[in-house]
Image (cartoon, coloured by chain):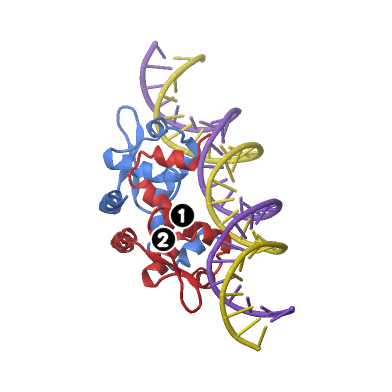
Chain colours: A blue, B red, C purple, D yellow
Amino acid sequence: MTTKKEIIENETCPAQGLLKLLSGKWKPEIFRLAVEAPLRFSSLLRQIEGSNKQTLSVALRELEEVSLLEKIVIKQKPLHIEYNLTEKGKSLIAVFKQLEILG
Amino acid sequence: MTTKKEIIENETCPAQGLLKLLSGKWKPEIFRLAVEAPLRFSSLLRQIEGSNKQTLSVALRELEEVSLLEKIVIKQKPLHIEYNLTEKGKSLIAVFKQLEILG
DNA sequence: TTTAGTAGTCATGATTTTCTGACTTATTGC
DNA sequence: GCAATAAGTCAGAAAATCATGACTACTAAA
């Protein structure tokens, strides 16, 4: 069996990991919105039209797993969850800027 | 109908286009090899193990369509075809370097 | 003229990703 | 207590991406 993890370990292209992690259908958009403000699941669902709970949920978990986003439980007033860019996430902004210029 | 082209035109994330174009299974690897030397179809097929004609052929065409590679017919000795990085392609190298560092 | 290499295309099938709708758990507001 | 909102999970269906094998067209060598 060739699992996803295995494939990532066998990468020959060093940038491929990062690339792959932003390659999901909604991940670049999620990332862009995260640059603007902390994310919340239900508003994301409303903001990104055409998206759906399942895919968004998996995307957020994966972005969290690779430490681009961090999940924070806000224990105030209307108890909720926020996703924020990590330092690693922030360091990717410059790369995106480059991509936009070249686009 | 929502075609691929339409979706690309509707992009809200400006870097998404570039990201998408490098998101195919073999594209990052193709790109990396193109940085090293001009590409030839049949050697690519041998170099990238696990790949196949069909996917490679489509990937090359798509990389050409977005002007990252250019297809050149070499009219010499053993008449063949080469794919070279364009200037736009070369300018992406720096972005990849950044990705590698952050990886 | 048969075989081999290069550069593919095409139809079909398999695999992977994404989408849909139903359901869950916890907290608030009325 | 009852409904609503938030943040999900799960199974199954649909769609997108990839892989396979057969086939084409051209060149060149044996």
Q: A75 or B40: which is nearer to us?
A: B40
Q: Is residue A45 left or right of residue D15?
A: left
Q: In this orientation, does residue A90 appear? A: no
Q: Is residue A1 above or below residue B5?
A: below
Q: Is residue B87 above or below residue B11?
A: below
Which subunit holds the residue at mark 1?
A: B
Q: Residue at x 51, y 68 (%)?
A: B41
Q: Amino acid at mark 1?
A: Glu
Front disc: 2 or 1:
1
Q: B46 or A3: which is nearer to us?
A: B46
Report x, y in % for residue B80: 49, 72
Residue at the disc numbered 2: A16
Secondary structure type for disc 2? helix
Q: Is residue B99 left or right of residue A9?
A: left
Secondary structure type for disc 1? helix
Residue at the disc numbered 1: B62
Q: Is residue B4 left or right of residue A36?
A: right
Q: Amino acid at mark 2?
A: Gln
Quarter of the image with the C terminus of chain B is bottom left
Report x, y in % for residue A67: 35, 52
Count of numbered circles on the image: 2
Label 2, label 1: how far apart the Cα atoms are: 18 Å
Q: A73 or A44: which is nearer to us?
A: A44
Q: Are marks 2 and 1 in contact (CB under 8 Å)?
A: no
Report x, y in % for residue C25: 50, 33
Image mark for residue B14: none
Q: Residue at x 36, y 68 (%)?
A: B35
> Tag 1: Cα neighbours inside 10 Å, few (<14), some, or many (≥20)?
some
